[in-house]
Structures are given as structure tokens and as C-alpha cells.
Image (cartoon, coloured by chain):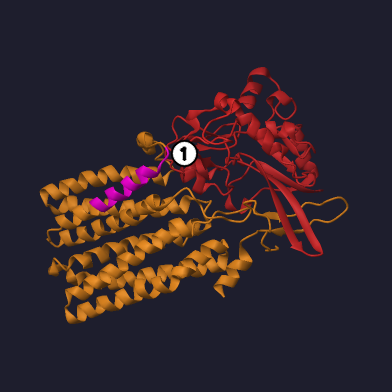
Chain colours: A orange, B red
Amino acid sequence: MSTQLPQSPDRISPRQQGNWDWRAASNFIAGGSGGGLLLWSALIALQGGDVRLLQAAGLALIAAGLTCVWFEIGRPWRALNTFRHFGSSWMTREASVAPLLFASGLLALWSGEALPAITTGVLGLAFLYAQARILAADKGIPAWRHPRCRPLVVATGLTEGAGLLACASVVAPALWPVAWLLALLAGVRLLAWQRYLAALNQDGAPAGALKALHRIDAEFRWGGNAVPAVLALLALATATPLLAAAAGALAVIAGWRCKYTLVCRAAYTQGFALPKLPVRGRGKSGAGVKPGWNDISRRVAA
Amino acid sequence: MKRYVMAIDLRRCVGCQTCTAACKTTNATPPGVQWRRVLDLESGEFPDVRRSFVPVACMHCANPPCEEVCPTTATKKRADGLVTIDYDICIGCANCIMACPYEARSIQHEARYAYGDQPMASEAARFDPDRLGVATKCTFCKDRIDLAARTGQVPGRDPEVTPACVNACISGAMHFGDLEDAASNVSQLLAQTEHFRMHEELGTEPSVYYIWDRK
């Protein structure tokens, strides 16, 4: 299959989607972090800790994300229609988790009991997973539908949650041992990122998507995962909450930047392709074309 | 059971955009919104260069990803194969736009007119506020298909019940009909020709077939 770029500006090649902007990205950014934070807070609650401030922060993040996306939709006063398609839409499922999560979260805040805290944590994980599945179901965006995007989105949400916990150790020093969790998750996220990027390069993706992802590659790999992991281990070795907090802040910022890039910068459409060119007159069929894809993919990877 | 499909003979399409114009006229889509358009694709290297014209629109997939992700059930697949949008239910979340691999959908958040802020008389007469803030796309001229069900006419054969783009095509490249009917024009045409569907590897099972050679 030929891979030449078309000369025509007629929207043939993949192009950056323009319908989801920072407001939609904010839902994935804040919602993912909030879900991760609620999950890890639940684990601390299991050990008898009072995690109500952390839970409040997690709920506030998710609420902020949903508010942002509410401002993005075309008919916001019909937002309740979102609940109508539980059978197959992950957006409905995400929306359906939200009221349960807030009810459970408010109960946990009011009672301070472990059981609602754990329920809230599990629902936070469900919210995060639903977000990953929303992207995966969007077949029109190759960078999202790739099977390795889903683990990356979940991994970064969990890492951000652990990062926020580590940040909180500045004001709650008892939390600094979560640095081990942060170090572990930063490693997992790094692995998920590398596997995702390698697979996209291998399988092919729109050139613009690869460029956008490669633009943050080094910074995310090192500044967002390797350095936080090392800092977290140093915090453990030296029992320094401040180091853990710094590691957490780096991991959170990197995760947010990664998701913003994924939703707003790397979200290129499929574009158009012809597996066969039509026969004209007495001529022969030409080789197929898929503008904006493979050759650029390989060049960027190289 | 019927399954309406479109067969487009790429060997015949000359890229005149008459189908595009017919669609805009019939459906009164605003500036910047094209439910149907014709791609002009240049490929190859000098001296072996080619130019192909590819009419595209909603593919009315048998397995529509837009329907699957729609959180509101505004997008539905009918028994006859048409994929529809209920403007009264859609919230304009754009999830369907992200799910469509054919860039067939769009959302217009505010009214736009051809010449500035004020509509021409024809635009004012046909302005539909229900279409603001919701996803819109090619309907396969479903009102005509529905008319056929009442009158007994045959889409693809009788112009009154055939999509406007197919009626308008000057080169006879576009055909419409019932794939389940072995005697229909599209069934016979597809039986005689080599064809493909766009992005078949994605499993969407589009209802638009592109003919590229005879058998």
C-alpha cells in the first residue's frame, strides 16, 4: 500500500479533533486523579486512618471534572439523558457511577467509617476504568482505540492518586510511607507508556498523533516517572516527607500533561484510505493509499 | 427485512461535487457543515500519478460505533439499516463524533449563515433550531425512505424516494437500493463488480460500497 501524503487540503489525511477541548480533557485529568485518590484513601481507611480530607479532595476533583465537561456539551440542560444507554455506552456507565460515588463519599465523610470509605474507593476505581473505556470505544481516534491506551489511562490515574497522597504528606507526615506505592506505580506507568508508544509505532498511527506523543516522551519518561520513582525511594530511605511530596507533585503534573496531550493533541482522526484505486478507462487499478499514516509513523519512530 | 446500501462506482465519479450541492440544498446544512462531500485524492509520483474522487458521508454502518457509545440513545440503527439521530434527545457530547472513523458527524453550536450574521430569506425559512448543539449527519434522506414504505415505491429506482445525492449524480456513479433484494440495482451491480468498504478492518460494516473494477 502506497503511503504518500496527499497534496490536497481536502480533509483526507487524519486531522486533530476539534470537538473535545480542555474542558473534556479536564474530566479525564481531574476525574482520573480523583478516582485514584479515592481508591488509595480507601486502603488507608482500611488500616484505620482518618482519610476524610483526602476523600473530600477526591470527590472535589471528580466534581470539577464533571462540571467542566458539562460546560462543553451542546445541550447542557439535557445532561440527564446521559443515563439512558447503560447497555453499551461507557459514558453512561461513567455517569452512572458518579451519583453512587458521591452518595457513598458523602456518607464516608459524614460517618468517618471504613465501609463507606472502601465503597467509595471501589467506585473511584470504577469511575477511572469507565473513563479509560470511553476513550477505547472511540474508534474514530486511533491513538485512543489502541488496546494499550486503556492500561495507560488507568495506570496514570492510579499513579496520580498515589502522587496526591504523597503530596499530602507535607501536611500529614504520617502519609509519607505511601512513597513505596508511588515508586511502584510510577514504574508501572512508565512501562505502560513505553508499551503504548512502541505499539503505536509498530502498528501505525496518524503522523500527527505520533508527533504529539513523541513531543512529551522524554519529559514524561524521565521527569514524570523515573525521577519521581527515584525521589520516592529516596524519601523512603531517608524518611523525608518533603521528598515524597516532590515526587508526588512531579508524578501528578506529568500525568495531567500526558492526558491533556492524549485528549487534545494526539487525538487525530482516522482519515480516509483506499485499499484499491479505481480502474480508469483501459488502465489498471493502482495500489491503495492511506495518506498521513505509515511512512510518517516509521519516520517519527526512527 | 430490508437493508439499504449505497454503491458508488469510483470509476465513474468525476469529482463534480453535484452530490455535495444536492445534499446541502436538500438538507439546508449551514456553512461549514457538509453531510456529504467528495474527496479529491492525488497519489503516486510523477510521471505515474493518479487522481481519485471519493464521495463520503455517513456510512450507515451495520455495526455503528456511534450508536454503541452514544450515552443518550439519540443515535439508533433502524431495521432497514439507516443510522439516525434524535435531535430531541442528543446532548451534543460529541462522543459519537470521536467514535466515527468516517468524520461523518458534526456539531454546530451557534447559527451560521452564508453572508454574515443575518440569514438570507432562504436560510431563515429553513433554519432549524433543533439542530443547534446536537450531532448531525447524513440521513440517507430518511424522509424519502419512509415515504417509500407508505407508497410502495422503490428507493434507488423511483427518484421521489431516492436520496438526493444519488438523484443528482451526473455520471451515474451513485446507486442506492436494498441489498437484501437480489434483484435490486445495487445487489446486481455489486455482484458484477469488485468493491470494498472504507476501513473494513475496524469492524463497522459500512453500508457504502466503493466499486473499483469489474469482475
Q: Is residue B20 left or right of residue A172?
A: right
Q: SS of the residue at dot 1?
A: loop
Residue B91, image x, y percentages? 42, 37
> Closer to the camera, A21 or B79?
A21
Give the magenta-colored segment's residue range: A60-74
Nearer-the-camera pick, B170 or B126: B126
* Farthest right residue in view: A282
Residue drawn at the location 51% of the way across and 52% of the way down: A17
Say whether residue A68 is magenta. Answer: yes
Neighbour tally class for label 1: few under 14, some 14-19, many 20 plus, Cα within 10 Å = some
Mark 1 is on which residue type?
A: His
Residue A2 in view here: yes
The answer to whether residue A84 is left or right of residue B192 is left
Q: Per the image, is A175 magenta?
A: no
Quick one: quadrant of the N terminus of chain B? top right
The residue depicted at 73 percent of the width and 26 percent of the height is: B159
Q: Position of residue B57 (x, y in %)?
A: 63, 42
Residue at (11% x, 52% y) in the render: A112
Can the viewer see residue B3?
Answer: no
For disc 1, the chain is: B
Up-down relation of residue B112 to residue A182 (above or below): above
Identify the residue at the far top of this view.
Answer: B151
Q: Which residue does the numbered mark 1 point to in the structure image?
A: B109
Q: Is residue A17 left or right of residue A185?
A: right
